Image (tube, grey):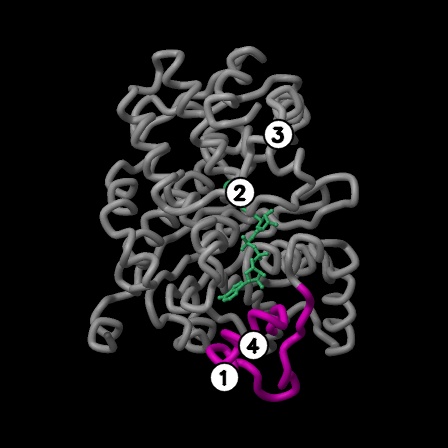
Amino acid sequence: MLFYLSDMPATRIEVTASAGTYPVIVGAGVLDGLESLLDAAGLGPQRIVVSSPTVWAMQGARVRPLLRGKRREPVLVPDGERSKTLQTVGRVYDALIRAAADRSVIIVALGGGVIGDLVGFAAATYLRGVRLVHVPTTLLAQVDSAIGGKVGVNHPLGKNLIGAFHPPRLVVADPLVLSTLPRREFRAGLYEVIKYGVIADPALFALVRTTRDALFAHEPGALESVIAPSCRIKAEIVSRDERESSLRRILNFGHTVGHALEAVTDYRRFRHGEAVAYGMMAAASLGARRGLTPVDAASAIKALILELGPLPPVSDLKATDVAAATRRDKKVVAGTLHFIAATRLGATTALTDVTEKELKQALREIGIR
Ligand SMILES: NC(=O)c1ccc[n+]([C@@H]2O[C@H](COP(=O)([O-])OP(=O)(O)OC[C@H]3O[C@@H](n4cnc5c(N)ncnc54)[C@H](O)[C@@H]3O)[C@@H](O)[C@H]2O)c1
Ligand SMILES: [Zn+2]
């Protein structure tokens, strides 16, 4: 395996943001070179690593070399959706102030999407903004949340309501860190990879199916082969539409119903990716009924999702409630719901005229009452 690791060059993907471009480095073992990557990008010398106790215990050793000089310990704050609050951001501010961090500080966020979003928000606001580096440690964070510059926290009255745009200076995605990720978390990220396949890359979609066992066995080469194209797709889309005026909406494939499922279950039942998995199956059903999504493509989407493993139940949920929740989605623009449907594997279209009846029918087809 080591032979393989040293033999495979890392993938470098550039993201264009209004604040400048930044690279996403993907590769098995790249984290071991984090210090040189930071040095090469002129990101130093004052660095503060922020992580969670769980992630630090499992993956901290990989970034230990960064902790030298004054800052010998990482700043650890709890992760998990319930901790993604302004209060936790406050703890990051406290640590930054105690460390006398000035404008030259580099904040390295080591963790999943929760750590990335909340530490990113702290970086966006501390001293009106300091430099941020993402080291995502979940599959979801590697292929999605670390790229694109959206940072933020939840409010007691709604998810991700407080936020900012604060693109990182560097993203380092090392598949080796996924070795300790619980299987369910891993699967949740894999559904987002499938999403990229459906919206932009049929070969990626096929690869998830054909390399499934290797992916679940955390084989670095297999992981890299799906992470790199996923990052490339996200990078290309956000580079062309940073603020989600149009193109970026295609990333919401499966998310209209997904967000609604999360909301009606109070964000407790599903991992985000699992709710999106149901959302993609609902979008496939709706698209097929309209004659937009070829029936075999719709079946392939459903089959691949179901093949990956169990999803939490939905049979106790009411289609009326889920449909109502889609209308409260943050992504409703001026009263119009933009529903993304697949026109084949690898291409989508946005629908603005989805009726309540159609939506409920699609929800029933995925097992909702
Ligand atoms: N900013 C964006 O564009 C964007 C996009 C998508 C999602 N998000 C956000 O991302 C969040 C979800 O992120 P997530 O799915 O990564 O969840 P998460 O950050 O809660 O991580 C999931 C769990 O995995 C653990 N963990 C993380 N890395 C690990 C590792 N290597 N080994 C073992 N355990 C590990 C964490 O401790 C946590 O318990 C949501 O809050 C969502 O809103 C943001
Ligand atoms: Zn998502």
Name the residue located 58 percent from the left edge and 13 percent from the top edge: 356
Disc 3 is placed on an element classified as loop
Tag 1 near tag 2, CB within 8 Å:
no
> Does 130 sit above or below residue 196?
below
Write down the quadrant of residue 348 in the picture. Answer: top left
Image location (x, y in percent) of residue 236: 39, 42
Tag 2 near tag 4, CB within 8 Å:
no
Q: Is mark 1 within 8 Å of ligand 1?
A: no
Q: Identify the mark nearer the N-term, 3 or 4.
A: 4
Label 2: how many Cα within 10 Å (few below 14, some 14–19, many 20+): few
Q: Name the amino acid, label 1.
A: Pro
Which one is in front in this view, the residue at disc 1 or the one at disc 4?
A: 4
Name the residue located 61 percent from the left edge and 46 percent from the top edge: 165
**Mark 3 → mark 2, Cα distance in angstroms:** 11 Å
- Residue at which label 4 appears: 57
Residue 5 or residue 359, whichever sits in front? 359
* Number of dots carrying numbers: 4
Which one is in front in this view, the residue at disc 1 or the one at disc 3?
A: 3
Label 3: how many Cα within 10 Å (few below 14, some 14–19, many 20+): some
Q: Name the amino acid, label 2.
A: Pro
- Residue at which label 1 appears: 65
Name the residue located 38 percent from the left edge and 45 percent from the top edge: 193
Write down the quadrant of residue 202 in the picture. Answer: top left
- Residue at which label 3 appears: 317
Which stretch is magenta?
49-78
Residue 291 or residue 302, whichever sits in front? 302
Name the residue located 76 percent from the left edge and 66 percent from the top edge: 91
- Residue at which label 2 appears: 312
As for residue 316 lying within the magenta part, the answer is no
